[in-house]
Image (cartoon, rainbow, N blue to C red):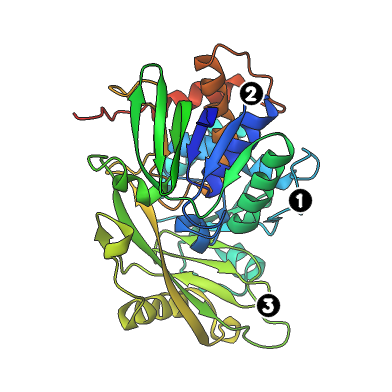
Amino acid sequence: MKHFEVAIIGGGIYGSSIAYFLSQQGIPAVLLEQGVIGAEGATACSGGIVRVYDPDPVLAQFSLFGTIEWSAWSAYGYPGMSPYSNAGCLYRLSPTGYTRVVELTDTLKGIGYRYEAFSGSRLQSRFPQIIFNTHDEVIWEPGSGYGNPRLAARNLAEGSCLQGATIYENCLVKGFDQCGNKWSIELLHGSITADIIILATGAFGRQLLPDLPVFTRSISLLQLSKAGTGCSVNYPIVDEILETYTRPVKDGGIYCGTQVFEDVKNPGELSSYGQPEKEDAWMRVQKLIQPEYIGLPVNGFKGFDCYTPDKRPLVGFVSGLSNFFIAIGFSGRGFKYCLPLAKAITWQICDRLGKTATIANFDLYVCRLSKQFNCHYEAGG
């Protein structure tokens, strides 16, 4: 029976990132993906907005480190074409966010955060595409932008192979059992063993651990065509007031989000994209962007992600399951900080295996910060 030190279940952006950093450490890992790397689950439909500011201060700090990593993809020696577009990002605050942002941005500036604050008359001259109210305040992040999660996952997975990892695509994991100090992992047509399992399956996690405290939430996007010659909104927008977001499309169009959600236990229970999602997204984007910059609806689709009740991910070793690590529940915001968090996870796995991690561009501050995601899930609890 084939044996690996680490088996990673899930070949989305997190599974692929972890496989890449583990293989850098010389740890023979296997990446098990039920479909094709980067083409399943949340990674397949994510818009990949990368921004720093987040109402959650821990996620904001992780996002800052993530933005730095995405912006320096080639300089850091990551494999393949850069999946990142450094377009900047506009974040409009709700009135209740004004005081909250002052304290947080002061903290972030201490670790390298770059941003500009705009309000009043300066807004319309700086961002003529956007519809503003008199008292609006926004944050402009010049180092932020958007990425291609599918390309990133494929690049990292291929890079992990070049460093010694193994990938099994179209490989369904049916279950696992602990046999002594090893895990036996049952596949659809065979089995393997591993010292450590990492569950990075996102919303599919409950298929293997039914009592995980997570749920699936739909993430629906409406795609608009380019408005006209030279008219485009070529940077992402996150809007707390209208509760929507937009993300550029390479042909000059945009994706825009909706507040029509569907919460279910598992992805297979979600309904198809429909008129309510389309109408809600269309209404919100018309309140956000000036008419001459809005194209016509051309496509709509429903993705999904894995959420926890407190919107923070479950990351850590599971109490009650020896050498079983989970990294799920990123609630649609996980792409932007997956690189630094995957490094922190790799640091923890190396420590469990009794090895010293030597990870490039790794700050122990990130690992200490990741402990605030400590896994408060106990198997069978």
Say what amino acid the circle numbered 2 marks: Asp
Q: Nearer the viewer, residue 128 or 256?
A: 256
Neighbourhood count class around disc 3 (C-alpha, 10 Å): few under 14, some 14–19, many 20 upward: few
In the image, is residue 26 above or below residue 135? above
Type of amino acid under label 3: Asp
Q: Could you tell whether 265 is left or right of 313 in the image?
A: left
Q: Which disc is residue 251 wearing? A: 3
Q: Earlier in the sequence, mark 3 or mark 1?
A: 1
Answer with left or right where residue 221 lies relative to residue 67. left
Q: Is residue 260 above or below residue 51?
A: below
Q: Report the residue at 63% width, 23% height from top.
A: 363
Q: Which residue is denoted by mark 1 in the rendering?
A: 80
Residue at 74% from the left image edge and 53% from the top image edge: 82
Q: Is residue 229 left or right of residue 259?
A: right
Instruction: Determine the residue located farthest toward the left in the rendered image.
Output: 381
Quarter of the picture containing the C terminus is: top left
List the residue tagged with mark 2.
363
In this view, 206 is above or below 2: below
